[in-house]
Amino acid sequence: MRGIFFITLLFVALGVNAQDKSFSLGLGYVFFGDGDYSGINYINSFQFPIFESMDLKIGAQIANAAETDEEYYYHRHNVFNFANNYNLVITPINFKIFSLSISTGAIWRYRTEIVFKSSKTVYTESGSPFRMIENEYNKSLDVGYNFDVTVLFRITEKVNVGLCGQFVGYNKGSGLYAVNLCLNYRL
């Protein structure tokens, strides 16, 4: 807690100002775990100033990733993630055409995961082969932390586009890394 306080004081002393109210949408690529499973990531957020040099960002995220086995054409591993986050945002670099912001905060998620366990061939009474697949189904509500770095380039007075890199860790289940293309609209 003292660390956040001292970082805030540092940015206040350097004259860092909060951003205007804004709404962001992002779409990108996600890696679950150690990069084992990749997929698609969608984010949206609403950001508004709470102190002179700090913003609060409230967001939602949907991520889905799957690994398939080409030989049998079934999903061996499928992860779906719905998350909601609350971040404190500091923007140390803010020029007319370019800004860089760093945010960190708490996140919770609902996760469903299908994990392939085994496959075996059994024969019916008529002697026809039949493949039996055993899967493990995991569902959980997890809490964790997230860290993002966002780079935005101003297109018009109200519209910005850029990239958002994101790392999320949870108390159980696999964390994720994501890179998103973002569209930001200043209100």
Image: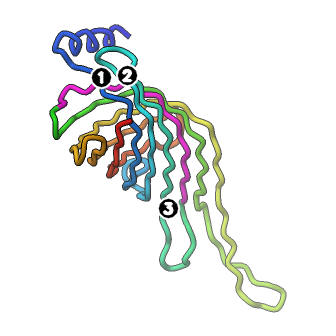
Residue 147 highlighted magenta (yes or no): no
Q: Tell me the magenta residue range.
A: 78-94
Residue at which label 1 appears = 18
At label 3, which amino acid type do we have?
Ala
Q: Is residue 96 left or right of residue 45?
A: left
Q: Give coordinates of residue 111: x percent, y percent.
A: 58, 45
Disc 3 is placed on an element classified as strand
Residue at which label 3 appears = 66
Q: Residue at x 59, y 52 (%)?
A: 113
Among the 4 quarters of the image, the one containing residue 94: top left
Mark 1 vs 3: CB contact within 8 A: no
Q: Of marks 2 and 1, which one's residue comes earlier in the chain?
A: 1
Count of numbered labels shown in the rendering: 3
Residue 49 is tagged as 2
Q: Give coordinates of residue 84: x percent, y percent.
A: 53, 36
In the picture, the quarter occupied by the N terminus is: top left
The Cα atoms of the two marked residues, 2 and 3, are separated by 38 Å
In the picture, the quarter occupied by the C terminus is: top left
Disc 1 is placed on an element classified as loop
Mark 2 vs 3: CB contact within 8 A: no
